[in-house]
Image: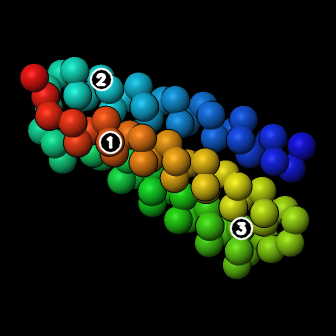
Amino acid sequence: MMIGGPLLIALLPGVLILMLTWLFRKMKWNKVIRMLPSMLTVMAAAVFVYIGYVEVRGFEGAGYLFLSVCLLLFATVAFIIAKKPVR
């Protein structure tokens, strides 16, 4: 449950970020606005790393670290989606 819980918790915002990035790309908005969800996700993942490593520590902190890694993966995919040229 220590690994499965953060993975499932990261799934909802991750899918939301991917859908938002896809919607921004479909609406043909500026590249900076399309990259905004991925940049905010990277900032949130950095905050979770800080909370997990400095504040909580131990096994409970590892849950935050798993959550941040999953969010970083979703942010990477959203960044790739946002960087694709719009047709």
Question: Residue 33 sits in which quadrant?
Answer: top left
Closer to the chain start, of discs 1 and 2, is: 2
Q: Amino acid at mark 2?
A: Leu
Q: Residues within 10 Å of mark 3 (few under 14, many from 20)?
A: many
- Residue at image coords 72%, 35%: 8
Q: CA distance from mark 1 to mark 2?
A: 14 Å
Q: Amino acid at mark 3?
A: Gly
As drawn, 86 above or below 35: above
Closer mark to the observer between disc 1 and disc 2 = 1
**Mark 1 and mark 2 residues within 8 Å of each other at the beta carbon:** no
Q: Amino acid at mark 1?
A: Ile
Question: Which residue is disc 3 drawn over?
Answer: 52
Q: CA distance from mark 3 to mark 2?
A: 32 Å
Position of the C terminus by quadrant = top left
Secondary structure at numbered mark 1 = helix
Q: Residues within 10 Å of mark 1 (few under 14, many from 20)?
A: few
Going by the image, does 73 lie left or right of 67? Answer: left
Position of the N terminus by quadrant = top right
Question: Which residue is disc 2 drawn over?
Answer: 23
As drawn, 65 above or below 29: below
Question: Residue 13 sits in which quadrant?
Answer: top right
User: At which x and y percent is residue 81?
Assistant: 31, 35
Q: Residues within 10 Å of mark 2 (few under 14, many from 20)?
A: some
Closer mark to the observer between disc 3 and disc 1 = 1
> From where the camera sits, is residue 33 visible?
no
Question: Which residue is disc 1 drawn over?
Answer: 80
